[in-house]
Amino acid sequence: MKLPGPIVSTQWLAAHLSHPNLLVLESHLNAPIKKLTPTQANNKTLQIQGARTFSLDNISDPDTTLPHMMPSETVFTRKMRELGICNNTIIVVYDNAGIYLSPRAWWMLKSMGHQQVAVLNGGLPAWIEENLPYEESNHNQKFLEGNFVAKASTTHFCNAEQVESALYDNNYVILDARSENRFLGLEPEPRSGLRRGHIPNSHNIYFETVLENGQYMKPIEELQRIFSAKVNHQQKLILSCGSGVSACILALAAELAGYTKITIFDGSWSEWGLESPARPVATI
């Protein structure tokens, strides 16, 4: 069995849910910034049948104060093995908001050399709406250890120094997934200690722009229209947001739209917006 692409439908997952090589992962944060709808909040204690928890809080770099930073190969290997993941495991990731946290887990796995991974279009809300098999969440399960070995890519993530060197290089386009008001510096950041504004010469595509009702990816033709207004296929994309999570939504949308030169600024605004070191910031 092979995945049909970077995104799969609820019907595809339901048809393959019992496949022995398939694992379903819930991309999870203890305190996500995005507010859940009442229905999503009611479903917060539910999971797709047999799902395992991919905790963005725990699967991150323990040696930095920046949120959600990528861990080392060693840490990532250990965490994936604890989830029972092997090198030949086929993985579908989802989250309880539709499409919000799941692209981050998808991108993390890809960056560590695991290509057989896809995002569930519609996430848990669509799954439950279609009355497909679900159960009470269990975030403390233990599993038979897998044999996963991480092999970190040098292209999936970049750091602040690399972003700074690309600011005025026409071979690069920096896209920011935060809301327009945060991008323009018209409202404060949800995290304390950060300046307002955006990376100079960057452009704004709010992550909700590529989604329908926050649950589904827009059709490929619409995604192509959104990205072609900002970037061409010869340019390299650097994607940023508040902490490197919603930027991965843009990464998924860009890949669906046919873009291949994509990297995530891991520190994103949580690093760039710090008072010290004072990197250049633009506002309106």
Image: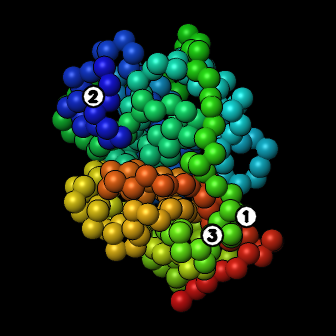
Q: Which residue appears at 38% of the width and 36% of the height?
A: 118
The crowd level at tag 1 (other Cα within 10 Å; few <14, some 14-19, many 20+) is few
Kind of residue sitting beneath label 1: Glu
Q: Residue 217: which disc?
A: none
Give the CA separation, mark 3 to mark 1.
9 Å
Which residue lies under the disc numbered 3?
A: 166
Which residue lies under the disc numbered 1?
A: 161
The crowd level at tag 3 (other Cα within 10 Å; few <14, some 14-19, many 20+) is some
N-term-proximal mark, 2 vs 1: 2
Asked if residue 68 is positioned above or below residue 281 in the image, the reply reads above
Which residue lies under the disc numbered 2?
A: 13
Kind of residue sitting beneath label 2: Leu
N-term-proximal mark, 3 vs 2: 2
Q: Secondary structure at mark 3?
A: helix
Give the mark toward the camera: 2 or 1. 1
Q: Is residue 85 left or right of residue 126?
A: right
Give the CA separation, mark 2 to mark 1.
40 Å
Give the mark toward the camera: 3 or 2. 3
